[in-house]
């Protein structure tokens, strides 16, 4: 669970700013909070929503967290990030730090970096009262300088960790190198890496979950949950299944791609292919004798006589397709202690559908430490009967073009929050020049 993210000089964020999902002292919607069990524990919110005008920077919050996730796991996406560009001069060093809970422990992991590589890296185990060093790293002209906390094991474990630190490349995190090289003695690193690798999942507008029908075939509980959610959202779809394709030519996939799929086949394995720029999804099932079959994912509806009618996926609306990306997420959140972030939840979705999705998640909250954080324009969610004020954040844009984050809880609202938001009381909405200032080009009469 994300407790706090701190950003500086990255994307639209100039000065250091933070967004926090540490629960306040309010008692409303108690199911929305993973409450501290011990004195030093930290209470965390299970839901968060980020609002802002177009180009205000709300998506950049999620992009920054996706970036530190990628860096933590060993990637260095040159060209996919840049510092705040409206400063003079532009500062080269960016900073991201994220505090999070995984299992029953809390960590703070951060990086300072530029396009040339990582300048500083740190990991602390934290609680409500103090921080415990796991490691810090500084990159100098002479190499890496490390400081370590307590290392378990014998002298050889300590020596190996120091050897790993010295050999970590400038464009690699020590967090990822420790895992790659089977480091020993710092169990906190494994816990932190595991959260980045499998505990944090981010859905962008272009993210697609293609294999819903295959998952349904492999897991009957998943299938039943999918059908139940399709009925709840009332899109007209009653099921998602695979249907046979007679020949490979009927897929309309490029011949070169088909040759590569078949040439790289593995017996008793299924290969999934999503057709470019469409919602079509094909499955190649390879058998031990070298033969294979092809199936295509389709949607099933029912007519007024309760007969099943099969639809191609490209016959479904963009909103229904978007919903199919979220159904596996809802099932995952209901069964596992995982954390999701969704950028632009309302993209292609009807306002009431977006609201129903959030209501579904909040209604099913259990004792598990799950978390869902979204960015959206959907102001129907600004309802204090549905959510808590400390779950809401606004991204504002200052005169210098930089973004800053403000919590709704700071305003201590006692009114219709949705109405106040649309009236500009909490900013984070677009402001326009008077229409009289428009200078339309006009055709001169002959």
Image (tube, helix red, strand yellow):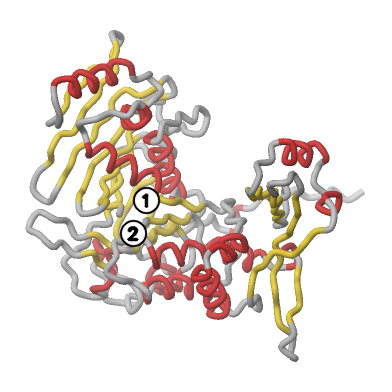
Residue under the point 64% across and 50% down: 270
Residue for point 74% across, 41% down: 262
Quarter occupied by residue 158: top left
Query: Is residue 279 placed above or below 189 in the rendered structure?
Result: below
Q: Position of residue 135 (x, y in %)?
A: 20, 29
User: Quarter of the image containing the N terminus?
Assistant: bottom left
Q: Is residue 206 left or right of residue 313?
A: left
300 sits to left or right of 93:
right
Q: Residue 410 at x, y = what percent?
A: 24, 61
Outermost residue toward the top? 142
Q: Is residue 401 visible?
A: no
What number is the disc on residue 337? 2
Nearer-the-camera pick, 415 or 336:
336
Q: Which residue occupies the extreme front position in the image?
A: 289
How busy is the neighbourhood of tag 2: few (under 14 within 10 Å), some, or many (20 plus)?
some
On the image, the x and y values in percent for residue 165 come to: 27, 20
Question: What is the secondary structure assignment of the residue under circle 1?
Answer: helix
Q: Residue at the far bottom: name it.
A: 305
Residue appearing at x 86%, y 49% in the figure: 249
Name the residue: 69% across, 41% down: 265
CA gap, disc 1 and disc 2: 7 Å
Whether residue 359 is situated above or below residue 161 in the rendered picture: below
From the image, tell me which residue sits under label 1: 199
């Amino acid at each position: 669970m994300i407790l706090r993210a701190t950003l500086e000089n990255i994307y639209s964020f100039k000065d250091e700013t933070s967004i926090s999902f540490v629960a306040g002292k309010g008692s409303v919607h108690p199911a929305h909070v993973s409450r501290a069990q011990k004195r030093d524990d930290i209470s965390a919110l299970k839901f968060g929503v980020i609002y802002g005008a177009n180009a205000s920077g709300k998506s950049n919050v999620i992009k920054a967290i996706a970036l530190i996730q990628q860096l933590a796991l060993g990637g260095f996406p040159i060209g996919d990030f840049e510092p705040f560009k409206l400063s003079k001069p532009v500062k080269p060093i960016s900073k991201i730090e994220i505090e999070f809970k995984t299992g029953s422990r809390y960590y703070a992991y951060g990086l300072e970096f530029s396009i040339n590589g990582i300048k500083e890296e740190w990991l602390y185990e934290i609680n409500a009262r103090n921080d415990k060093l796991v490691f810090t790293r500084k990159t100098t002209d002479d190499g890496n300088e490390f400081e370590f906390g307590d290392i378990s094991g014998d002298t050889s474990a300590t020596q190996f960790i120091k050897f790993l630190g010295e050999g970590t490349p400038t464009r690699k995190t020590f967090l990822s190198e420790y895992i790659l090289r089977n480091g020993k003695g710092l169990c906190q690193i494994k816990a932190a890496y595991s959260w980045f690798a499998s505990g944090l999942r981010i859905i962008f507008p272009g993210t697609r979950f293609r294999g819903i029908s295959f998952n349904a075939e492999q897991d009957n509980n998943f299938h039943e949950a999918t059908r139940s959610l399709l009925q709840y959202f009332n899109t007209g779809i009653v099921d998602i299944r695979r249907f046979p394709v007679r020949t490979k030519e009927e897929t309309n996939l490029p011949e070169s791609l088909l040759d590569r799929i078949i040439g790289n086949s593995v017996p008793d394995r299924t290969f999934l292919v999503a057709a470019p720029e469409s919602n079509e999804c094909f499955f190649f099932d390879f058998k031990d004798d070298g033969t294979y079959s092809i199936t295509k994912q389709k949607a099933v509806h029912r007519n007024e006589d309760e007969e099943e009618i099969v639809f191609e996926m490209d016959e479904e609306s963009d909103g229904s397709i978007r919903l199919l990306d979220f159904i596996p997420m809802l099932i995952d959140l209901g069964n596992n202690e995982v954390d999701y972030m969704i950028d632009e939840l309302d993209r292609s979705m009807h306002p009431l559908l977006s609201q129903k999705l959030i209501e579904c998640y909040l209604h099913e909250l259990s004792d598990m430490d799950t978390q869902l954080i979204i960015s959206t324009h959907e102001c129907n969610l600004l309802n204090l009967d549905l959510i808590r004020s400390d779950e809401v954040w606004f991204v504002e844009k200052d005169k210098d073009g930089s973004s800053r984050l403000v919590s709704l809880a700071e305003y201590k609202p006692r009114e219709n929050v949705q109405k106040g938001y649309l009236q500009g009381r909490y900013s984070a909405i677009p402001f326009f020049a008077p229409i009289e200032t428009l200078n339309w080009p006009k055709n001169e009469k002959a």
